[in-house]
Image (spheres, rainbow, N blue to C red):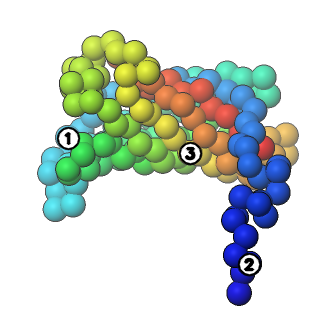
Amino acid sequence: MSTTRPLSEILPPEMKELRVRPLFTLLLDVAPAINVGKTPGVDRRVGVITGGRFEGERLRGELFPGGGSDWQSIRPGDGAWMINVRIVLKTDDGAIIGMPYTGIRHGPQEVLDRIARGEVVKATDYYLRISASFETSSPKYGWLNSIISVGVGHRLPEGPIYQMFEIL
């Protein structure tokens, strides 16, 4: 049986704070979403990712054209958008990296409606966060296979932009 001391007392100091390091900025080009509609579970949309680019200190490059899609689910009740994406990155030196990520976008309905119409809103007017992992056979970028990253996002009229961070 575990002790009755408060867990905050037994948690090591190095576990009381999340440390991150900037990884890269990611900008996606997306085609208009395909509206599958209200399925038995959710309101489904599929966004085809047509391209994009990423830039950071340790890696940079572009997305394969047509190298991904975003299977979006709009939750009944609160209207939050659940994001489920798979993209393929190609670094400027030719390495191929798979990047699956999931996330959530939510906020006031009037802000979400403005985003859906392609209007500009402030990033602080709503919440868009993702968590990503990576797959690569590249020895140079093999370190990506062993990290989790998080992203703070914003939906621009041309597509989403994320600041990605490596969780240390």
Q: Amino acid at mark 1?
A: Asn
Furthest residue toward front: 5
**Residue at horizontal 77%, vertical 60%?**
9
Q: Amino acid at mark 2?
A: Thr
Who comes first in sequence, dot 1 or dot 3? 1
Residue 152, image x and y in percent? 54, 31
Q: Read off the residue under disc 3.
A: 131
Residue 73 falls left or right of residue 146:
left
Query: How many C-alpha atoms fall within 10 Å of the one at disc 2: few (<14), some, or many (≥20)?
Result: few
The residue at which mark 1 appears reads as 35
User: Is 68 positioned to the left or the right of 8 in the image?
Assistant: left
State the residue at coordinates (56%, 45%): 131
Circle 1: element type: strand
Asked whether, in this view, residue 55 is left or right of residue 152, the answer is right
Distance from disc 1 to disc 2, alpha carbons, whole Å, reads 53 Å
Which label sits in the foreground, 1 or 3?
Answer: 3
